[in-house]
Image: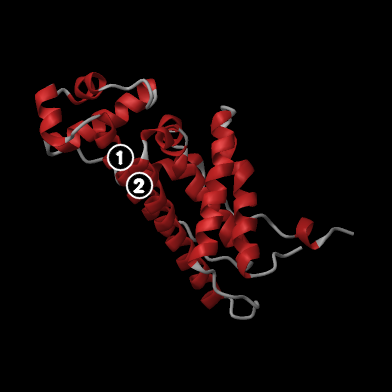
């Protein structure tokens, strides 16, 4: 006799193409200002060479701008990257906020949300590596930016959990505190970092989504068998 887990149909998964399309909704406009061109130049440089090897010369080459223009807007390469990182977090927050698909089984909502978020995170493997692994070498400013980013994502996790509690009042649950939410998000990023270091970025959405979903779900409720 099949178990309840085997009988239950898996949740509908967002595809890589759908995740990329969601991400690109926020990136289709052409840059309107020199600052925007430089930020896109920074993204292109990182995707071409990685953060550690990228230079101001690479940024201005991709942006088709002068070094003088660069230094009118940014104090150095790290300053430019950290502003780009804030934009990336804005997009990940937007994607995470819009990732929930109501399901009959509450746990499935966490699987879909986790998979959607992880697809968005790895649309650009080079930027994922820079934002999760390489930026930690940039010093206190980068660590502060990373903490702010993880906290914003943790706030979205709390929002997703509270919406789920309202949709599934029959399931005993408790609120996720900000501290627990931050621990979950930080733990997920540590798992992603391991995959990045092993050059297994493409496997992240499918392999880590169930793990991340279970971490998020078990904090507030008991996951289904």
Mark 1 secondary-structure assignment:
helix
Q: Nearer the viewer, residue 30 or 33?
A: 33
Q: Are marks 2 and 1 in contact (CB under 8 Å)?
A: yes
Q: Residue 163, how many percent across, how many down?
A: 49, 71
Relative to 71, does residue 116 appear above or below in the rendering?
below
Residue in the picture at 61% in, 60% down: 108
What whole-number distance in Å separates the C-alpha atoms at marks 2 and 1? 7 Å
- The residue at which mark 1 appears reads as 82
Q: How many marks?
A: 2
**Which image quadrant for residue 73?**
top left
Q: Is residue 55 visible?
A: yes
Q: Residue 23, how many percent across, how many down?
A: 37, 44
Q: Quick one: quadrant of the C terminus? A: bottom right
* Residue 118: assigned label: none
Outermost bottom residue? 170
Q: Quick one: quadrant of the N terminus? A: bottom right
Residue in the picture at 83% in, 60% down: 3
- The residue at which mark 2 appears reads as 145
Q: Is residue 224 left or right of residue 132?
A: right
């Amino acid at each position: 006799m099949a178990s309840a887990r085997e009988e239950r149909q898996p949740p509908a998964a967002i595809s890589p193409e759908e995740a990329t399309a969601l991400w690109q909704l926020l990136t289709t406009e052409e840059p309107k200002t020199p600052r925007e061109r430089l930020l896109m130049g920074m993204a292109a440089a990182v995707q071409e060479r990685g953060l550690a090897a990228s230079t101001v010369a690479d940024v201005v080459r991709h942006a088709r701008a002068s070094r003088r223009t660069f230094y009118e807007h940014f104090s150095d390469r790290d300053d430019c990257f950290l502003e780009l990182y804030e934009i990336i977090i804005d997009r990940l927050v937007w994607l995470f906020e819009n990732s929930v698909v109501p399901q009959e089984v509450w746990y499935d909502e966490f699987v879909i949300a986790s998979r959607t978020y992880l697809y968005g995170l790895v649309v650009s493997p080079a930027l994922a590596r820079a934002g999760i692994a390489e930026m930690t070498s940039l010093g206190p400013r980068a660590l502060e930016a990373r903490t702010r980013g993880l906290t914003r994502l943790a706030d979205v996790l709390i929002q997703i959990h509270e919406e789920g509690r309202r949709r599934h009042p029959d399931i005993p649950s408790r609120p996720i505190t900000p501290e627990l939410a931050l621990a979950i998000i930080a733990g997920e990023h540590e798992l992603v970092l391991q995959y990045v270091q092993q050059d297994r970025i493409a496997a992240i959405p499918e392999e880590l989504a169930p793990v991340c979903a279970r971490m998020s779900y078990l904090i507030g409720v008991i996951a289904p068998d």
